[in-house]
Each structure stands twice: as C-alpha cells, then as structure tokens.
Image (cartoon, rainbow, N blue to C red):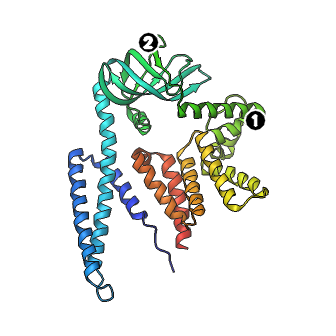
Amino acid sequence: MRRPLPAFVLPTSFLIAGIWWQLLAGISFLLLQVFTLATCFALLVIAQHAHAMHACVSAKYVHATDSDNALLAALLTLFFFSGALLFCAHKMHHAIIAARFDGQFTSMTGRVYAIQRDNTRARDTVDLYTFACDNEAIHACIRCSLPAKSNIEIGDYLHINDTPLGAPKGRYRLFLERQGISLTSSPTLESTTLLSRPLFSIYRLLDHLHEHAHTTTMRALSSQSAALVSPMFFGIKAHGDTDSDQFLFTGTSHLLARSGLHVALCLLLWRFLLGVLPIPLFMQNLLLLCFALLYGALTRPSISFLRGLAIFVLYTAGSLLGRRLQFLHLLTFCCLCILLWNPYHLFFLDFQLTFGITFALAFAYHLG
C-alpha cells in the first residue's frame, strides 16, 4: 500500500509555480494583491462552509467531498498567488532602489552586515545595510568594493561620502538580488568614515570565531590537506598549493563543493565519537544537535549545506520530543521555508540540483 504524500508537497509545488509564473508573465503588484486578498476571502468562506457541513451532517452517511475539494483548491490557489506576490514584492523593491539611485553620486550611512576579504588582491568587499542616502530615509543593501584592506568589522556604522552608485546588469543583477543587494559602489578609503562600533555584536563574534577556527586548522595541516579541508568544511577557497586540477580532470571536482554530504560526514564522525562515551542516547542526540548548530554558525553556508543541516536539526529535535518524522515531509518543509525566505533561490542551479535530486530520490523511496 502506497503511503500518502506529505501535506506540504502540493502547496510547495503551487508556490513554485506561482514564482515562475510571475517571472514569465510579470503581473502587476496591485493586481496580485487583489488576487491574493480575494483568494483569502474565498478560503475563509469555503472553510467555514466545510466546517458547518462536517458539524451538522454525520460523516457515516454523507461525506462533504465537494467542500473538501473546494477548500483544497482555494488553499492551493492562495499558495500560487502568494508565491507570485512574494517574488513581485522582492523584485519591485530592488527596481525602485535601482531607478532612484543608479548613476548618482550619493552620501550614505549604514551598518556593515557582511565582509568578504580577498587576501590575494589585498582588498575588502563590504555589504552595507543603508538607512540614509543624501539625508533621505531609505532601506537598501549596497555592496561596496574597497580598493585596499581596511579595519572595518561586521556591525560597524559607516558614513560614505559622495560615492557613485550603480545598478548591476544582466545575470549579475539577479545574482546580487538573490543576496538582497540592490546597488554596487566603489568608494575610496578616504571617503569612508567609521561612525561607531558596538561593544558587542553576535555576527562579529561568529565571524571572528570562524576566522580563528579556519586559521588554526589551516596551520595544523599540510598545504595539500588545507586546500581540501578549507573549501569543504569552512567554505573558503584555499590559496596556494591545491590539487583542484586533478579533481577537475577526474570529474570529481563536485566533492570540493559544500553540500549535505559534508554535513553527513561531520555528523557521522561526531556520532561515532559520542557513541564511545558512556552517556545516555538522549544526551548523545542533544550534544550532536548542539554540535550541528555550532558547526552551522561557524561556517559559510550554501543552499545544499543548509538543506542537510536543517533536515538533521528538525529530525533530531523530533526524536528528542518523541515524534516520528518523514524525510520527504521535512525536505518539503525546508524547501517551502527557503522559498518563503528568498524566492530568488528558485532560479539558481544549486537550489534546483540539491532539491531536485533529493526530491527524486525521496519520491522513489516513498513510492517504492
């Protein structure tokens, strides 16, 4: 007997269809709002009607299948228009910011939320969450490429004076919008002023712990081992002696990419080490859950990494609470949450491959 599909499969499928439909059709934001509100109203009416039928009519003689089907259709329609509305809102926000500041020289104030340090070119790339441009209140994320190394840290408040802003073009624009970035800039160090630095920032602390763990591990390994461990477990491409060409020649370069495989390897190793200790199974699962969350906080995640980590955390938490969970249910729930958080992920190959292949394997096992 075939097991029924998890409850999130159909809503997630219609959410994906709505996002793609909005990308291809380009329906206006106002019209999508009307469609979504109308669907919500219809869903409430149908749900109330179905509840009344189930309450007044005995299910032993009459099954309210028409109301159930109408309720399911309204719910799926709501997910379809919600996906389109969500993507349209993200896209319209970036378009408004780009149209307002593209090609202009602007003075802006904001907070640093991410830094990419390029040691080979001795330069930093700072992602700035701005809340004021030319004394105008505005909320936008801007990628600033500094020409040299700086002492800027995550959480710092900066003021950049009279710098040109530009909107990315083509595929690069979609890539930056996926990261929430609307504009790019190349300010000089002289035009960049540090306004303040908070005494404590959890993101700065995690960034320092990540850098310290990476530096300590790289010093303890040989150059060849460091070149393999750095991209696989820390998400940083190592510089120097690497065997990446050999992996490329043998067709195994995908092993160097961050994926759920590396999450599984780390967790299996920790599971083996914890199994040696004379502690209860509940404590082993709890410690393993803490190790997994710490590992996720101290590394640079990718979509496949987040998928593997999220499924493990949800499954382990369910085991600790005494709940039986299906893998396909957890996979669909993770896919739904990631798309609700950022619908741009749907258009990139890493998301399509990691969820597409995993869904195919999970469906084959489910139907078998």
- Horizontally, residue 54 falls left or right of residue 148, namely left
Q: Quadrant of the C terminus?
A: bottom right
Q: Residue at x 51, y 81 (%)?
A: 1
Residue farthest to the top, as pictured: 190
Looking at the image, can residue 76 be seen? Answer: yes
Under circle 1, the secondary element is: helix
Report which residue position mark 1 lands on.
224
Looking at the image, can residue 168 be seen? Answer: no
In percent of width and height, residue 186 lies at 44, 19
Marks 2, 1: nearer the viewer: 2
Report which residue position mark 2 lands on.
191
- The three-letter amino acid code for the residue at tag 2 is Ser
Q: Residue at x 41, y 45 (%)?
A: 342
In percent of width and height, residue 217 lies at 73, 35
- Horizontally, residue 149 falls left or right of residue 7, namely right
In percent of width and height, residue 133 lies at 33, 22
Q: Earlier in the sequence, mark 2 or mark 1?
A: 2
- The three-letter amino acid code for the residue at tag 1 is Gln
How many residues crowd around disc 1 within 10 Å: few (fewer than 14), some, or many (20 or more)?
Answer: some
Q: Using the image, determine if residue 251 lies above or below residue 154.
A: below
